[in-house]
Amino acid sequence: MTRTRVLFVDDEANVLDGLRNVLRKQRNVWDMAFAIGAQAALDELARQPADVVVSDMRMPGFDGAALLQQVRDLYPSTARIVLSGHAEREAVMRALPVAHQYLSKPCEAEQLVAVIERTYNLQALLHDEAVRGIVAGLSKLPSVPQAYLAITQAAGEPNTTLDDIARIVERDPALVVKILQIVNSAYFGLRQRLTSIRQAVQYLGLDIIKGLALTGQVFGTLKIAPFEGFSIENLQRHSLMTARLAEKVARGFTSTDDVFTAAIVHDIGKLVLASGFRTQYAEVRRAARTGKRPFHELETEVFGASHAEIGAYLLGMWGLPFAIVEATAFHHRPGLVTSGDRSILAAVHLADALIGAAEPGRDDKVAEQRMDVGFLDASGIVPDLAGWSALARQELQAVG
């Protein structure tokens, strides 16, 4: 079996010596290389590419963000991690678009090892030949919505208000229509109709606005005629219900930051398959219903990958946060993520399983059949199936 190759980059030799020492137990697991400075790192990668690059942020010449940008362009399948003792806001914001993970010094060896393994495993999954083949077979991929990028950038500024977010939303007429449509639907049960986008943004909050901005363009611009077992409207409805439920169940065990966004995009890979492989995908869905088997299992048999990996690949191309990409990739198989904070993944997995079991026309109606209870136990989450199932039924009732 090929060993994982990890390249550590820092401008101080004593820091690299310290990493060699604390990671000595990994010598039998990884092939490790150490480079003093960014140029030495690029020379080392040209000699032998790495599976993971772990870089300091501040280095002379060009810094960690510039290095990782070149790594992303030259070696897109390489996992990129920042390990830095400098927590200045500007430096962090520059690193976010090009780094999969960001760790602060000092960092415990166990945490560093877990993050490297977890980041590498996700990158390896997303750059599987089957996934890349499916994406390469498409004539056109949706691009990351500009409204989402603008909202995310503004949200990272310390003095941004919801009024500032509303002004960004107002520049995108299609997003304005989508937000007003959703906030005034029976789903939110408002007694008085909202016509002001500022009021809608204040009511919905930043996380929901980001999620709607992210999915609005994709759902709105892809023209896919309905076929047996599939329609964009039904997929959007399922995604919104899952996102709403994920936020609610997450409140019991974690912060809800990014949970709504992760849940509302978790099935975006279905759009890729439905738009690029309509005939085959229709057959997959028909076979799943006839044989009473999960869609994602048959997708893997037919395409070599499921909508989960394909969607995560697209989100990774868009530069979305690691936790959102990971939750999308593993929402049907969360047990493959065995360490670290798995709260967002758990919330998305829970909500998707519960909504799926509660939706009409599904053969696997029992929540336990769709849920990885072992993963929840290992993650320290005490299942409340009766309470969560009741919440799922409420979500379905809310949308009629």
Image (spheres, rainbow, N blue to C red):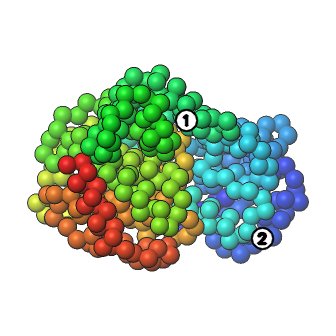
Q: How many marks?
A: 2
**Rounded to the nearest whole Å, what is the CA distance between mark 2 and mark 1?**
45 Å
Q: Residue at x 41, y 39 (%)?
A: 212
Q: Residue at x 42, y 35 (%)?
A: 200
Q: Which residue is mark 2?
A: 22
Determine whether the residue tagged by mark 1 lies in a helix, strand or loop: helix
User: Along the line of sight, which residue is nearer the eye, 64 or 252?
Assistant: 252
Q: Is residue 247 visible?
A: yes
Outermost front residue: 191
Describe residue 154's horizontal placement relative to residue 123 as left or right.
right
Q: Nearer the viewer, mark 2 or mark 1?
A: 1
Q: Which residue is mark 1?
A: 162
Q: Quadrant of residue 371?
A: bottom left
Mark 2 vs 1, N-terminal side? 2
Q: Position of residue 227 (x, y in %)?
A: 14, 41
Q: Residue at x 35, y 60 (%)?
A: 351
Amino acid under disc 1: Leu
User: Along the line of sight, which residue is nearer the eye, 129 or 374?
Assistant: 374
Q: Position of residue 132 (x, y in %)?
A: 41, 45
User: Along the line of sight, which residue is nearer the eye, 123 or 42?
Assistant: 123
Outermost left residue: 290
Amino acid under disc 2: Val
Q: Residue at x 74, y 56 (%)?
A: 104
User: Along the line of sight, which residue is nearer the eye, 270 or 89?
Assistant: 89
Q: Residues within 10 Å of mark 1 (few under 14, many from 20)?
A: some
Q: Quadrant of residue 135?
A: top left
Q: Is residue 301 visible?
A: no
Q: Is residue 311 above or below residue 289?
A: above
